[in-house]
Amino acid sequence: MVQAYRMHIGGEWVGGDGYFNDLNPATGQVMARFPAGSAGDVDRAVDAAEGALKSWSETPPPKRGRILQRTADILRKEKERLGTLVATEMGKVMPEALGDVQEAIDVFEYFAGEGRRLFGNTTTSELKGKFAMTVRRPVGVMGLITPWNFPIAIPAWKLSAALVCGNTAVFKPSSDTPLCAYELVRILLRAGVPDGVVNLVTGSAADVGEAIVRHRRVGGISFTGSKATGEWITKNAGLKKVGLELGGKNPVIVMDDADLGLAVEGIIWGAFGTTGQRCTAASRVIAHRAIRKKLVAELVRRAERLRLGPGVAKTTDVGPLINMAAVEKTEGYVDIGRKEGAKLVCGGKRPPGRGFFYRPTIFDDADRGMRIAREEIFGPVLSVLECGGLDDAIDIANSVEYGLSSSIYTRDVNSALRAISGIEAGITYVNASTIGAEVHLPFGGVKATGHTREAGITGIDEFSHLKTVYIDYSGKLQKAQIDAGE
């Protein structure tokens, strides 16, 4: 029998009128069933979050932080179990799945400390006998909409920052990984999060996601996902505080003086880790013409040795894609690449057997105008483009609409600094791959990636408002600008 799970609204576990299936991507088999939530469920969740807001926002921030620390402690104790769940439900190989949980541990610990550092600023006034400062205030009820590719880590990024700032939450996870979200909410409740502060509503984007985005009493939206959905949210959220972390088409520049062995390691990890299903995946290699052929040959050699299989298997290097739609999308882009004239040098097909697998794929002789070199595929497909020098490489890197992560391999510090300055991206790595964000540093991009900065101190900015406070102790009416004089 497949277990049917429940949503969490206002401190109670509740079912729904209908249910959807949660599939194991390595087998295609049903592993759980979850309520197909509705706009009515969202209304009830917003009611509960609104009802809990005053008490939670008035809870001293260090006390809120202690609950986050307890959450981190429970996650640490249950890391192996949760990592196995991530590997099973999402398909990541076990080292990555355990890393997903570790990222959640780290981010809850980080924002637990922010309970004692919700800093504002003080400054001088232009008038005598007047004090000026800023303080942080919660946004209110936050709608948190998360993807499937980091099914514990990304919800943890959002929930930790939102909660320490005094917000309450209506949380809609991806319908591909609801069980990871369910387990995270259970841990938050065990850690002491009060009823109504975190409400879990499962279901489709059409029935649940849209209701959260449009809801008049939701004060803010934090969304990680596709550019198309981000554009829809921008048009439909109204006057809410909106944070969007969208797609990427991330370049790895490999210069002629690079350590090629190090570059190959980073490219293989960045392109095929998580089966290419990261917004920071290394989907483009921009190789100097002097080393391109040698680099491609080594990339092909390494990619062809990668072993496909279930994420939980110790022998697996690359797990499945998340669902059949992702397989078909990847397959479609491979067909596009062939028709555009890129040279398929590795992969390009499904393996036999069940599950949602696709072989690591490399295209050589790609051009910046090709769709495979411009559009986010979100699968194990890497395009190699040639450049004549650093300026050419930076120009190619910037030729796409996205600007999330980027990388350059070079031994020349001047080239590295020019790339850092010239590449249009929120993140640049030097002699490392495009993936590997750390939770105490800001994460986000520019251009069509959106302009959100999660994690680090900027995570507090995403989930709070700054209120400016003036205290006049002069004992008389003073008029700023008018009384300030020259």
Image (tube, rainbow, N blue to C red):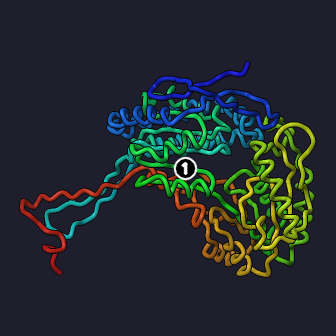
Residue at coordinates 24% horizontally, 66% vertically from top-left?
124
* Drawn side of residue 347 relative to residue 140, left or right: right
* Drawn side of residue 78 relative to residue 109, left or right: right
Q: Which residue is mark 1?
A: 223
Task: Establish if 151 lies above or below 293.
Answer: above
Quarter location, residue 100? top right
Amino acid, disc 1: Phe
Is residue 115 in view? no
Is residue 128 in view? yes
Residue at coordinates 85% horizontally, 40% vertically from top-left?
309
Task: Establish if 270 lies above or below 19.
Answer: below
Quadrant in which the C terminus is drawn: bottom left
Task: Establish if 138 lies above or below 469.
Answer: above
* Drawn side of residue 384 relative to residue 168, left or right: right
| 470 or 8, nearer to the observer | 8
Task: Establish if 259 lies above or below 475.
Answer: below
> Residue 152's x, y, as percent?
62, 39
> Residue 377's x, y, as percent?
74, 57
Residue at coordinates 89% horizontally, 48% vertically from top-left?
350
Quarter location, residue 425? bottom right
Q: Circle 1 — which element?
A: strand
> Residue 75's x, y, as percent?
59, 33
Quarter location, residue 391? bottom right
Residue at coordinates 84% horizontally, 59% vertically from top-left?
334
